[in-house]
Image (spheres, rainbow, N blue to C red):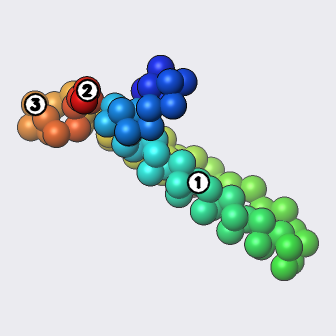
Amino acid sequence: MILALLRLDFYQAFRYNPLLFILFILGFIYIIFLIIIYKKKKVLVLPSKRFWIVLLVILLIYMVLRNIDAFVYLIPTEV
């Protein structure tokens, strides 16, 4: 995926690992949400431990599922 990103081949990078693109978009939305809170309340809110644990669990589940034969559609493919 990283090599495809370095070649600016975003379609192939997405085919290799779509979860990271989805998490990037969700992370971007979360950061914007934190900025809005900071601007309104002047309080710096950092991601909680729960946030990092949920993120780690999602990544681990995805990594395990893509290696099980029943989830063959999660295996990286090339164009």
**Mark 1 / mark 2, whichever is N-terminal:** 1
Instruction: Assess whether mark 2 and mark 1 are in contact (beta carbons under 8 angstroms).
Output: no
Residue 33, percent from left and from top = 68, 68
**Mark 3 / mark 2, whichever is N-terminal:** 3
Circle on res. 46:
none
| Residue sitting nearer the eye, 7 or 49 | 7
**Mark 3 / mark 1, whichever is N-terminal:** 1
Q: Which residue is mark 1?
A: 27
Q: Amino acid at mark 2?
A: Glu
Compared to residue 6, the image places residue 65 above or below, namely below
Give me the residue at 83% from left, 69% from top: 38
Q: Can you say which quadrant of the picture contains the N terminus?
A: top left
Instruction: Assess whether mark 2 and mark 3 are in contact (beta carbons under 8 angstroms).
Output: no
On screen, residue 70 versus residue 24, left or right, reads: left
Q: Amino acid at mark 1?
A: Gly
Circle on res. 78:
2
Q: Which residue is mark 3?
A: 69
| Badge 3 density bin: few <14, some 14–19, many ≥20, Cα 10 Å | few
Compared to residue 21, the image places residue 68 above or below, namely above
Q: CA distance from mark 1 to mark 2?
A: 26 Å
Q: Amino acid at mark 3?
A: Asp
Residue 59, percent from left and from top = 41, 40
Report helix, strand or loop for mark 3. helix
